Amino acid sequence: QVQLVESGGGLVQSGGSLRLSCAAAGGAFNRVFMAWFRQAPGKVREFLGAILWRPGSAYYADSVLGRFTISRDISKNTMYLQMGNLQPEDTAVYYCAGDSPDRTNGLSYLQPDRYVYWGQGTQVTVSS
C-alpha cells in the first residue's frame, strides 16, 4: 500500500521561505502526476501545482506562479515544494497527492478527485 509522508512545514515570517517534502513509501507506485494542494480553515482545498512524474514538467496555479517551485527526485521517490516570499494568506495545511494511471476517471491534474493517494498534511503558518 502506497503511503505519502510529508515533512517540512512550520512557522515562518512573512517574506520567508520553506521547502516541503513528500516521500512515497510502501510499494510499487506507478503514477502519472503528483500534486500539491492546500486547505485553509473554512476554505475548499486549493490546487497549487502538479508535476508530470517521469519528464519532470511542472504546472502551477496562478496564485503561486513565480513563488513556488515543484521538483522531484526519482531516486528518492520524493517530491518537493519550494515556497518563497510567503505571505500570511499562504497559511494552510499543505497536502501532497499522487494519482494512479488506471484510476484517474479522466479528470484533470487540477482536480483533487483525480488523486488516490494523499499525505497526512503538514501545517504551514506565516506570521505578519
Image (cartoon, rainbow, N blue to C red):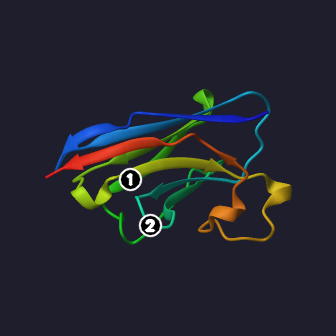
Label 1: few (<14), some or many (≥20) within 10 Å? Answer: many
Q: Which mark is residue 126?
A: none
60 to 125, vertically: above or below: below
**Which image quadrant: the N terminus?**
top right
Residue that numbered label 1 is attached to:
92
Residue drawn 39% across and 33% down? 8
Residue 93 screen position, x and y as percent:
43, 49
Q: Is residue 71 left or right of residue 118?
A: left
Residue 11 screen position, x and y as percent:
26, 39
Residue 61 screen position, x and y as percent:
44, 68
Disc 2/disc 1 C-alpha distance (Å): 10 Å
Q: Amino acid at mark 1?
A: Ala
Q: Is residue 2 left or right of residue 51?
A: right
Tell me if label 2 and label 1 are in contact, CB under 8 Å.
yes
Name the one closer to the observer, 115 or 121: 121
Q: Is residue 119 left or right of residue 70?
A: right
Q: Which mark is residue 43?
A: 2
Residue drawn 78% across and 62% down? 104
